[in-house]
Amino acid sequence: MTQIKVGIIGSQFAAGLHAESYKRFSEVKLQAVASLDNLEKFSSEYGVPSTYEDYMEMIKNEDLDLISVCVPNFLHKKIVVDIAEAGIKNIICEKPLATTIPDAQAMIDVCKKNNVRLMYAEDWLFAPAVIRAKEIVEEGGIGKLLYIKAKESHSGSHSIYAQKKEYCGGGAMIHLGIHPVAFVSFLAGSDIKEVVGMATAGGDTNLLHTNYTGEDWAAALVTMENGVKGFVEANYITSGGMDDKIEIYGTEGNIHIDLTKGSPIDVYSRPGYGYAIEKADFTHGWTKPAVDEFLSLGYVKEIEHFIDCVINDKEPNVGTRGEDGLKALEVVLAIYESAKSGKLVKL
């Protein structure tokens, strides 16, 4: 059996999502992690033998087949460029690909120049419920596809890198809405050609989080090149845990998906218990705890696909390439432009 050596850059939330998924596969040896903090806790929890504060030292000293980039958005470009130029041939970059179009394009260009496989971590596309819904749509189960609604929302991030536009590249739409944006295009099998967006503008204009410099609410109507319509939303004003919902409408039927609160388990607890779902404030009273959040949200199948690409020298699926990350970013930035101008924006 072929085994690949993996390194992770970053040691906080996103890095944990990757590590939790990697540990499910015998084909993977999680060899090293590089981060400025949380190293001891992270390496102990996931059994990572080598730790580094400098990711370039990790690249220099470790024989790695694949690196996951799980750092704040504004650092993606520099780190991906450094990895590609150092000769590592496989990179997974967390969403969004970058905070600006030039940075995203530079990442794609340097990877192509150095024959590096740049994989974009869009987990929604690997959620089992999404995969099944797409199968039903493709076999004509709801007739001709007409309209898709998708949103991701929660109560806000504790990370300064998500709260500040200078680090994140925006607010809720780039940080959360990047998933619905990628999904509607993926399901429709067509690129988004125009958007009409609305968003709060950060600070005192926000609905709730006036200390965030990026928006805490944003939404957009989108039109695909094949005529399918879409509505995407992202917000930081939703209490009660992460809320990811999808609605798909066709001429002969519709599909409704609850990615985060669709658990088959109902629990009533007076004292509360350890964990229900991401961003839930408490667990007493009636709750619907996740059964396997990493699987249901797509992380496990996503990592499995990327491992297969590395071992069998395959290109990642449409929707999970660097180019697809660039397209999603272009749509998000067009939504911001539309929200600011009050006009329809064509891509």
Image (cartoon, rainbow, N blue to C red):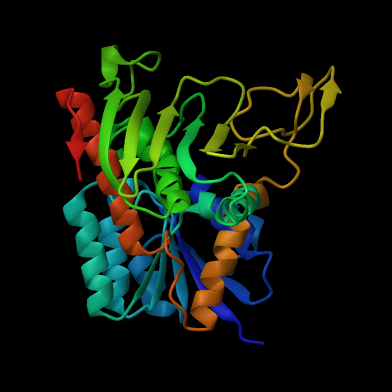
> Tag count in the figure?
0
User: Nearest the camera: 15 or 21?
Assistant: 21
Please determine whether, in this image, residue 20 is positioned above or below residue 116: above
Please determine whether, in this image, residue 38 is positioned above or below residue 257: below
Q: In the rendered image, is residue 43 in sight?
A: no
Corner quadrant of residue 204 = top left
Residue at 38% across, 23% down: 217
User: Nearest the camera: 139 or 125?
Assistant: 139
- Viewport quadrant of the N terminus: bottom right
Q: Residue 279 at x, y = what percent? A: 59, 30
Residue at 46% across, 73% down: 66
Q: Residue 205 at x, y = what percent? A: 28, 13
User: Nearest the camera: 178 or 190?
Assistant: 190
Corner quadrant of residue 180 = top left
Side of 66 relative to 89 (left or right): right
- Viewport quadrant of the C terminus: top left
Q: Which residue is most to the bottom?
A: 1
Q: In the rendered image, is residue 144 in sight?
A: yes
Corner quadrant of residue 339 = top left
Please determine whether, in this image, residue 137 is positioned above or below residue 317: above
Q: Residue 88 at x, y = what percent? A: 37, 78
Please determine whether, in this image, residue 133 is positioned above or below residue 1: above
Residue at 45% across, 39% down: 146
Residue at 19% across, 33% down: 337
Q: Residue 57 at x, y = what percent? A: 36, 71
